[in-house]
Structures are given as structure tokens and as C-alpha cells.
């Protein structure tokens, strides 16, 4: 499939608004838009900001090329005034937001876009598509990392999602603490460590299991992982050690009662002298199945479908709303969808020990700073110029520290209140 240009990641209704605003003279009004979640997905106690680095690059390259404008004109989507406006479009406003890897909660203003109405509103679909996907993946992955209790997890869900989403998902999962990915495009694009084993097809290709294992070891050496559950797991382990020797790096189990099989496999490996051979388990792993294996002799997990689909929450439920026009707060009053007007400033308040106790959001106000408060927003774009953005390693470390800072109840996998309360101080 052809890669879609960032500018065509735009919904038609955005161009409808721009056309009308250009005609009535409101397109150049100074506005502020904010990205936030009214509520977290069911069962979640925190959200994770992810995708900022990808988004800023996409906005930097957001242009309407002649062919794209011709398509919009010929389809009757835009008039000539709008076509001329799109031809010269460059985002010239400001973008502030939470650091990538930061936690967020209901109402957190994780991204603030300010500038002329038209130049800001045209970015709505792009911003929400990146954030709703990447934040959902990162939150699910973070829960899996917590459940794993320090054991590494491999992201291996590329076959369970769209080809472009697979790369973004691998990035978000690595940000959340996954050790590696099987997606080579993500490895090349973002420097994520890559790893992988063989599939059952490779074993079935050969006349018998020892021959398949021998071929893999001959090609890759003993520092490889052999998939031992194509036929009988016990015999598969015996065949693996007979072929590779007791210093085989790892075996992988992809089916069955993983709790029982992990115990049995460890005992069998040890009896064969392979005391250092690792056990990797995979097969529809999510945070709950990982948690159930906490006491078992598992060395590494492989997560696929659950992580790339947000483990039951495929979107972060983020919205992009206009909150200020020409310095004046504006609000939406629709039932269950009301907004708080005005540009927000957010701080995270902590105990002297470093434990976060609440998030305070000021609308058109100056934060009442106290010791151990931390300002949550930073500038990414100023007057259209992209500033230096923290890289993926920095975002990964930021999230690690953020998860340490919240009360331990906030890390539970069970449903409950957000990890910390959010207090919104309205416009005076």
C-alpha cells in the first residue's frame, strides 16, 4: 500500500470548517486547542503519553502537494480560496505538551496547540490518530511491564495489526519498557533492539524435529531460541538439548497451560544439564496472563495481539477541543461532554519522598508552586519552528521514573480510581 502523505491524514469536515472560516473571515482568529481525555478506558488507573516524537515530525512535514490539492478540488471538497490556502500551508503556531513518557489522567492537557484557527484545526485528525493509537499501546504495554516484574518482554504483534501501525506499536511498547521487538522496520527507524525465533512452519518443513533444530543451530549458533512445542514439548526439549547441547540460549513455548509447562520444562532442562537455558513463553499474552506466571520459572515473555490492540482498550479516548478564542475562554456545554474553557497549565504535586499525590490544572491562571511541584508541559514548536525533542530513550526513562512516583495502588491491574486525583482550578 502506498504511504499516505501527512496532509491527507485529514478529515473532510476539517476542510469544510476551513472553507467556511476563510469565507467569513474567522480563519485567522487566534485560538487554543487542547488534547485531553474526559475519562480513562475502563479498568485503567493511568494513561501514558506516547507518540509525541512521531507527531512533531509529521507536523513538521505537513504539506499539501499539488496532486493532493488537485484531488480535493476535482472531488468538489474545496473551493479555489481553500485550494490557495492549502497550497501555502505551513504551521506557524505553538505546540506545548506533556513530556513523552509522562503519565496522564482525566482532564490532563497533554497537548496544547495555539495559532490561527485554520492552521490548528487542520491538524486535528492527524494529532488524534497518532495519540489515540500510541497512548493506548503504551498504557497496555506499561501494565504488562509492571506485571512482568523485571522479566523482559518481546513485542511480537506485527501480524496482528496494520503494517504501519505495527511500527508505531513497537515504538510505543519499547517506550513503555519492552526489551525488544520482532519488527525490523521499527528496529531500523527507532534503534529498538530486535529479536525473533522461528515458527512452527520451520519445524514442519523438515522431516523431523531434530533435523529442523540442527538446521537452525547450524545457521545461527547456540545463541538462538528453539521452538519446542510443535509436537510433544518434553521430547522437543530433549531434542533441542541433544542437538544444541546444554549451553543452548533458550527454548520457546507457545501453547498449552504455560504455568504447568514452565515448571516441567525447567525441571527437564535442569536434569539435562541445561541449567542456564532460558524459557520464553508466548501465545496470547496480556498483563493478566503475565501476572499469573509471576511465580513460575519463566525468563522472558512474548506479547503480540494484546499489546498492539491496547489489551482491550485500542484507543486512549483522547479528544481535541477548542478552549480559547482571542484570549477568551470558550466551553462546550453538551451533556456528558462539557469542557473547561481557557488554556491550561498543569503541575504534578509530590510528597518530599517523591510520591505523586495530585495533579493540579490551572485554567488561565498562574500555578501556585510549592516545593516538590513539577511543571508538566514543555514547548515542542514555537512560532512554527520545531525545537529539540527528547528521544525515545529519554521518554522510556521518563516513564520508568513516573511509574515509580505514583502510589503503589495505582499500579494494580484491577479497576479502580485514577492513580492520583486531578484538581482543576477554573478561570477566575
Image (cartoon, rainbow, N blue to C red):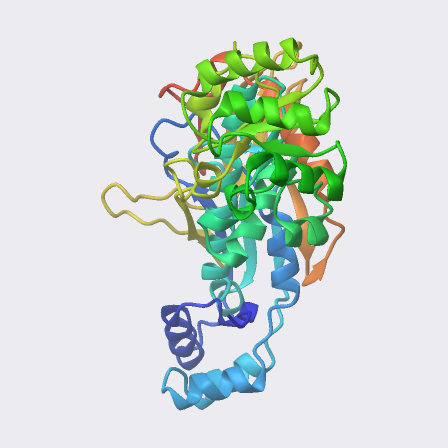
- Quarter of the image with the C terminus in it: top left
Residue visible at 66% across and 23% down in the picture: 241
Q: Is residue 312 left or right of residue 187?
A: left
* Image quadrant assignment for residue 50: top right
The answer to whether any part of residue 99 appears in the image is: no
Tell me which residue sits at (43%, 88%) in the image. 73
Q: Is residue 71 visible?
A: yes
Give left or right: position of 378 versus 37.
right
Q: Position of residue 270 (x, y in %)?
A: 65, 10
Location of residue 408 with respect to 232 vertically, above or below: above
Name the residue rendered at 68%, 37% in the picture: 214
User: Left of 354 or right of it: where is 233?
Assistant: left
- State the count of labels: 0
> As rendered, which of 300 and 412 lies closer to the eye?
300
- Left or right side of 159 for 385: right
Relative image position of residue 162 (x, y in whole percent): 47, 56
Q: Nearer the viewer, residue 278 or 90?
A: 278
- In the image, 195 versus 349, the foreground residue is 195
The spot of residue 281 in percent (x, y) is 53, 27
Q: Quadrant of residue 41?
A: top left
Residue at 65% from the left image edge and 33% from the top image edge: 225
Residue extending furthest toward the front: 207
Q: Position of residue 304 (x, y in %)?
A: 49, 39
Q: Nearer the viewer, residue 141 or 328?
A: 141
Amino acid at each position: 500500500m502506498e504511504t499516505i502523505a501527512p496532509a491527507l491524514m485529514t478529515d473532510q469536515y476539517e476542510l469544510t470548517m476551513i472553507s467556511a472560516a476563510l469565507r467569513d473571515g474567522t480563519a485567522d482568529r487566534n485560538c487554543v486547542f487542547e488534547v485531553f481525555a474526559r475519562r480513562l478506558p475502563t479498568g485503567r488507573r493511568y494513561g501514558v503519553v506516547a507518540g509525541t516524537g512521531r507527531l512533531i515530525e509529521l507536523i513538521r512535514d505537513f504539506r499539501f502537494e499539488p496532486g493532493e490539492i488537485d484531488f480535493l478540488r476535482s472531488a468538489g471538497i474545496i473551493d479555489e480560496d481553500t485550494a490557495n490556502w492549502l497550497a501555502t500551508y505551513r504551521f506557524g503556531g505553538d505546540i506545548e505538551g506533556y513530556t513523552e513518557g509522562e503519565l496522564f489522567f482525566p482532564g490532563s492537557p497533554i497537548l496544547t496547540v495555539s495559532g490561527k484557527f485554520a492552521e490548528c484545526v487542520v491538524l486535528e485528525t492527524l494529532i488524534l490518530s497518532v495519540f489515540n493509537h500510541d497512548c493506548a499501546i503504551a498504557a497496555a504495554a506499561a501494565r504488562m511491564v509492571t506485571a512482568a516484574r523485571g522479566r523482559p518482554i518481546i513485542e511480537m504483534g506485527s501480524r496482528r495489526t496494520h503494517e504501519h501501525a505495527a511500527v508505531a506499536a513497537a515504538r510505543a511498547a519499547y517506550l513503555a519498557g519492552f526489551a525488544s521487538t520482532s519488527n525490523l522496520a521499527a528496529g531500523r527507524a527507532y534503534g529498538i533492539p530486535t529479536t525473533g525465533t522461528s515458527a512452527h512452519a520451520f519445524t514442519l518443513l523438515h522431516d523431523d524435529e531434530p533435523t529442523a533444530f540442527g538446521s537452525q543451530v547450524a545457521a545461527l549458533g547456540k545463541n538462538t531460541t528453539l521452538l519446542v512445542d510443535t509436537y510433544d514439548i518434553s521430547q522437543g526439549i530433549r531434542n533441542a538439548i541433544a542437538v544444541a547441547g546444554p549451553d543452548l540460549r533458550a527454548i520457546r513455548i507457545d501453547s498449552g497451560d504455560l504455568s504447568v509447562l514452565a515448571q516441567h520444562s525447567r525441571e527437564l532442562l535442569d536434569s539435562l544439564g541445561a541449567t542456564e537455558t532460558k524459557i520464553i513463553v508466548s501465545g496470547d499474552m496480556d498483563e493478566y496472563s503475565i501476572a499469573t506466571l509471576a511465580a513460575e520459572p519463566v525468563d522472558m515473555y512474548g506479547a503480540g495481539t494484546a499489546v498492539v490492540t491496547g489489551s482491550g482498550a485500542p484507543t486512549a479516548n483522547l479528544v481535541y477541543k477548542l478552549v480559547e478564542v482571542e484570549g477568551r475562554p470558550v466551553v462546550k456545554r453538551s451533556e456528558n461532554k462539557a469542557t473547561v474553557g481557557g488554556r491550561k497549565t498543569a503541575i504534578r504535586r509530590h510528597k518530599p519522598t517523591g510520591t505523586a499525590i495530585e495533579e493540579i490544572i490551572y485554567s488561565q491562571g498562574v500555578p501556585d508552586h510549592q516545593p516538590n511541584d513539577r511543571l508538566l508541559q514543555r514547548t515542542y514548536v514555537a512560532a512554527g519552528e520545531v525545537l529539540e525533542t527528547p528521544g525515545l530513550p529519554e521518554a522510556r526513562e521518563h516513564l520508568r521514573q513516573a511509574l515509580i512516583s505514583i502510589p503503589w495502588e495505582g499500579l494494580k491491574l484491577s479497576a479502580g480510581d485514577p492513580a492520583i486525583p486531578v484538581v482543576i482550578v477554573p478561570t477566575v
